[in-house]
Image (cartoon, coloured by chain):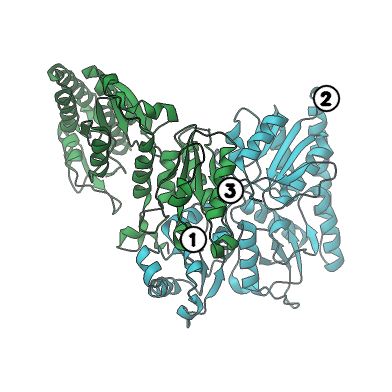
Chain colours: A green, B cyan
Amino acid sequence: MNSKHSHSNISRHNGCSVSGALSVSAFIKDAATIVHGPAGCAHQASSLFYSTMIAHGRFEIPDIYTSGLLENEIIFGGEDRLRDSITGALSFDPPVIFIIGTCISETIGDDIDSVCMEDYGVPVINLNTAGFLGDSFDSGFFNALKGASELINSGFKEERTLTANIIGEKNLEFEVEENFAEVKRLLDLLGIGLNIRFVRDITTDDIGTFGRGSLNIFREDLSGELTRFFAEKTGLPSIPAFPSGTNETLGFLREAGTILSLPWEEAVEREKEYQRSVFEEFSDLRGELITFDSFGFQDAEMPFFIDIAENTGIKVDPEGTVIPVPFTAPVGTGGIRRLLREWRRFINA
Amino acid sequence: MLERCFNPVWPCAMVGAASCMAGFSDLGVIIHGSAGCYNYAEMAVPDSLNCTYLIEDEIVFGTGNRLREIADAVSGLYDRIAVINTCVPSIMGEDIGDYLDGYNAIIVDLPGFSGDFDKGYKEALEAVGPDIDFEREGINIHGICSIDPFARGNLLEARRLLNLAGIKTAAIFCHDKLDSAKTPAEYGISVNPDYNANGETLPGSILGTEKLISTFSKVHDHFPESDVNSIINEAEEAEERIIKACDKYLRRNDPPGVTIFSTKAYTEFSAGILNKYLDADICFAGIRNSESASLPGITSEKATDIRKIKDIIACEEPDLVLGSSFEYAINPKIPFICLTFPQRSRVMLHSKPLAGTEGSLAFIEDVLNALR
């Protein structure tokens, strides 16, 4: 038995905040990250992280430092060990150090905030994680984005440009670059440039230029937590998610254009034409029957799928070819095209 | 002094204990901890694992009910259960033995902060408590550690060689039923001495043709009815093939400079064979599970820190790197051979051995192909 799938309470399966935070901090190329816990925590998180990168065809390994807590620190406290680790990391001259707490440092009660507030000559930022104690992968990810935002400069209003900030890309997502490229294509239709990908393959200096953007676009902020936080921090208007499906994609163009007082009508017409050409490309699938397999934990009822099926002339029917529901909805019209290629492979198999 | 450590490349004691225990097919293994700890162990260990998936409430109010809930479920599927404690419940100091009264569970308190993979593996094996059964026929096979990329290939090779000698396989550490492992035979051969059940095994290791011949010669002393000549002949023929292939390489090329990063026994094996047949310059041997290796004239140190490994590879500029996919990722342009966990940069489907005659042949084959 693998009890991973045997419990109805899925809150037990929300992962570890250490990995979530690392999936942000490790993408600031010149920053150092210290996982404050046993070496095994850093190994496990970085191994998972790195193997995902390998699967994406990326070979660079970011430096992830561990305070390497041992039994002695478990008994007597790990704060001195954390100070030593910060000193060790400083020998490599990082412009910023992020601290990721673990369930161990939380349980033994280390005061990470106090250690971070000491003077090290560079910012040492606590990303406020605690492994699984009240935390999850997502909360680690959110807290790390908030922590990294401490590096955003204020007082930039006169430098603002017709560009967008992309916030909270899922760096471990297989299609992260394709999704970004799709949103960039949509922004290009409106004449909006890119300011910063916060946080993906950037430097600490890049973060300082955050305020030159005029619009924040989030990868996915279902709860609105990040949208509210960044609105308050930067004063910039926001779009809460990358678009999925035909209508959302057109809506994205309308919304971005309206927010920045740009004419959007032509961009929408061009995108509609592109969508028609994509569905025409899959006209051989008209009349086919499909049904969705959600693996028990994904949402197969999303209107998004019905929308694509109807536009292609495919019928959703319990007797149809079983199509697996992807972990995340494809982004934009380009995402629909890749999804339909997959459907075609299943239907023709 | 604080040991500098970037991206530690070797797992913690909990994973070692899980790898050992999950090798016993009739033992249900429960990781008593959170999803984060379990998810990694499940990815690293190919055998089945279960988990209590602890949440904060249980850390506050106690983990007993949750542990018994999972123990109940897993007990229905296995003859016996083993519970491996992780960091947080270990710090809580609960008496999980008391919680598991009546379950006949093997309890292993090996949280990550207690040490590395090897410590966990060895202490879990001690908890199994092998006790030699002097009446049992056959020879044990030691060193089958499930995260080792050669574990399955080594097991097939060791079994093949014992079959060839006409000797039964007794206990297999750790790929067996629990009762079989608790009552091993008197003698054993090892495919990877780092993971022997009880330190040194007699007659010994079969890593490399030299040791293989020596070990099976001793096997014959204890099992006079066995047919070890065919094995010794096969090993000598294999060595001839290795010499011929390596000589051919050396007629056109200089001996390669090699950096090795692996566990102790595999490092010693590969350094020995590369030195003997290719006159290789072993620039550095980085050991995952020991402070150094027995390699006269070769610099060997513990290397579990990716920054240190990066520095060594950059400094030595080797012609060939042996290691895990961490080492491969540092510079994918350098010819590379898999020698230790983890291997995620390439597909490995077939059961490749490192031990026995086939293991030596496969190793040299990989080296020569990589150096082309």
Disc number lying in front (1 or 2): 1
Residue A193 sits above or below residue B321 on the image: above
Upstream in the sequence, badge 1 or badge 2? Answer: 1
Identity of the residue drawn at 24% across and 16% down = A191
| Image coords of residue B171 (percent x, y) | 67, 68
**Tag 2 residue:** B251
Residue A81 visible: yes
Residue count near mark 1 (Cα–Cα under 10 Å), binned few <14, some 14–19, many ≥20: some
- Tag 3's secondary structure? helix
* Amino acid carrying mark 1 in the image: Ser
Same chain? Circles 1 and 2: yes
Q: Which residue is mark 3?
A: A84
Tell me which residue sits at (34%, 44%) in the image.
A142
According to the picture, the residue beneath numbered tag 1 turns out to be B48
The residue mark sitting in front, 3 or 2, is 3
Residue at 52%, 79% (x, y): give it.
B104
Amino acid type at image mark 2: Arg
Which residue is more in the foreground, A166 or B53?
A166
